[in-house]
Image: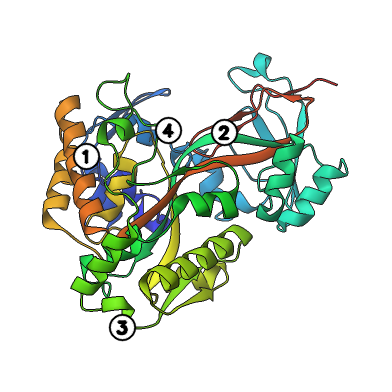
């Protein structure tokens, strides 16, 4: 939270702590921040407003504590194995950048007796194809990025593991540019694609098509029901309706509609999906669409500067609450890659952050999502799955719906 650290990760939690946002913005004092040390194991935190999800937010890995002395002694402490500190079941033994990380069991871990693995090696292989080759030749015991071109083969062979992931794959419309400032255009584009065809042809791993933004996996106020089931679908694919919306927006049969580009970062799946959507938009709406593939940092810069028409984006929740997704689209939000803003939406989200009544709070989020899906600054495509491979003798590895991997209870049983 100290502004001298110049980290972009402090604000999301600082905003909820009394005096935190002001201090992080260099407009307040450290002594006015609502954090008090009660004893070596306990912090007392005073919030600006009631925030029922605050404890879930503190479990986000960004906020795991590290030894202050180590951090202050070396600004690059987290780049070398010799100075890297953590507090989990493993500690770093060695790190060869861009090649491998080796961790060993942490005997000082509070539950060290439950940790069965004495050493883990993480091979840092950038190319998914090379990683798959290493897996299939026995050099590694599992990979966490499966080449999309090999998905079907691995699924048939039984090597591919698929777990639920609480995330949404979607396209963002740049509403600061014509013709995307018109909701009718955004609605027409959203209604004119075939999500099931995209899943069958591109991902091939039985994702659920998305007809709303918040994915499955998050409970509603009544915890026997999911938020998505209660909210239901907000639209259905309808090419005839999409054509009428486009005509109502002034582009009958696509006439007069400018050529648009789909921005995405390199990935077989991203390119396959973009190609399918390009063809669907051209075929169903009579518009001209081209693809714009940019490398990672260039792609991110284009997103940040709103230098795009339509862009591939995705979001996996940071904590198990619909707010983790809906908070993205408030006015000026750092992750709002659309330029869209709606006062009623912002008011609802602000209310969610203060509301202690579970039922009323969830209803506010359902109401907010309805606005989002009516205005459609984003086009949901499908709800994510977690895809990976693992040898049969590897047991006890936990893959979280948040996309995290836990090796605490892992074992090798050959």
| Residue 151 in view, yes or no | yes
Q: Is mark 1 on a helix, strand or loop?
A: helix
Instruction: Say which quarter of the image contains residue 57.
Output: top left
Q: Nearer the viewer, mark 4 or mark 3?
A: 3
Measured along the vertical axis of the image, is residue 274 above or below residue 346?
below
> Of label 1 and label 4, which has the lower sequence position?
4
Camera-side mark, 1 or 4: 1
Callout 1–callout 4 Cβ contact below 8 Å? no
| Residue beneath the point at 62% across and 41% down | 387
Q: Position of residue 309 (x, y in %)?
A: 37, 74
Residue identifier under label 4? 59
SS label for mark 3: loop
Residue 336 drawn above or below residue 205: below
Marks 2/3: CA–CA distance: 44 Å
Please report whichever mark, 2 or 3, sits nearer to the chain's N-terminal start: 2
Which residue in the structure is indicated by mark 3? 255
């Amino acid at each position: 939270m100290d502004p001298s650290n110049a980290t972009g990760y402090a604000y999301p939690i600082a905003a909820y702590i009394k005096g935190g946002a002001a201090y992080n913005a260099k407009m307040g004092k450290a002594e006015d921040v609502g954090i008090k040390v009660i004893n070596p194991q306990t912090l007392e935190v005073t919030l600006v407003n009631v925030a029922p999800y605050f404890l879930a937010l503190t479990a986000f890995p960004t906020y795991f504590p590290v030894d202050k002395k180590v951090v202050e002694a070396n600004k690059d402490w987290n780049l070398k194995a010799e100075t890297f500190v953590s507090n989990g079941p493993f500690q770093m033994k060695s790190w060869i950048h861009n090649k491998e990380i080796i961790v060993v069991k942490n005997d000082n871990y509070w539950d060290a007796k439950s940790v069965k693995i004495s050493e883990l090696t993480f091979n840092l292989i950038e190319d998914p194809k090379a990683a798959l080759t290493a897996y299939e030749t026995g050099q590694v015991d599992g990979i966490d990025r499966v080449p999309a071109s090999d998905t079907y083969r691995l699924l048939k062979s039984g090597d591919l593991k698929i777990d639920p992931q609480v995330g949404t794959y979607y396209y963002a419309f740049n509403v600061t540019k014509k013709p995307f400032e018109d909701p009718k255009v955004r609605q027409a584009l959203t209604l004119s694609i075939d999500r099931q065809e995209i899943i069958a042809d591109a991902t091939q791993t039985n994702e659920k098509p998305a007809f709303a933004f918040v994915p499955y996996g998050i409970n509603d106020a009544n915890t026997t029901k999911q938020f998505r089931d209660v909210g239901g679908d907000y639209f259905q694919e309808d090419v005839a309706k999409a054509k009428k919306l486009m005509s109502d927006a002034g582009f009958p049969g696509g006439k007069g509609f400018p050529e648009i580009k789909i921005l995405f970062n390199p990935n077989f799946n991203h390119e396959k999906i973009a190609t399918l959507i390009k063809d669907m938009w051209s075929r169903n709406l009579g518009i001209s669409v081209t693809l714009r593939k940019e490398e990672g940092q260039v792609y991110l810069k284009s997103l940040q500067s709103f230098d795009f028409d339509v862009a591939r984006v995705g979001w996996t929740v940071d904590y198990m609450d619909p707010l983790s997704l809906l908070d993205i689209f408030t006015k000026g939000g750092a992750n709002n890659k659309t330029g869209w803003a709606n006062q009623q939406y912002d008011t609802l989200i602000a209310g969610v952050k203060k509301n202690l009544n579970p039922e009323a709070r969830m209803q506010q989020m359902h109401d907010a999502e309805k606005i989002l899906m009516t205005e459609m600054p984003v086009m949901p495509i499908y709800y994510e799955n977690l895809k990976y491979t693992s040898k049969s003798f590897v047991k006890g590895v936990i893959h979280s719906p948040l996309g995290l991997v836990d090796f605490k209870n892992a074992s090798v049983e050959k």
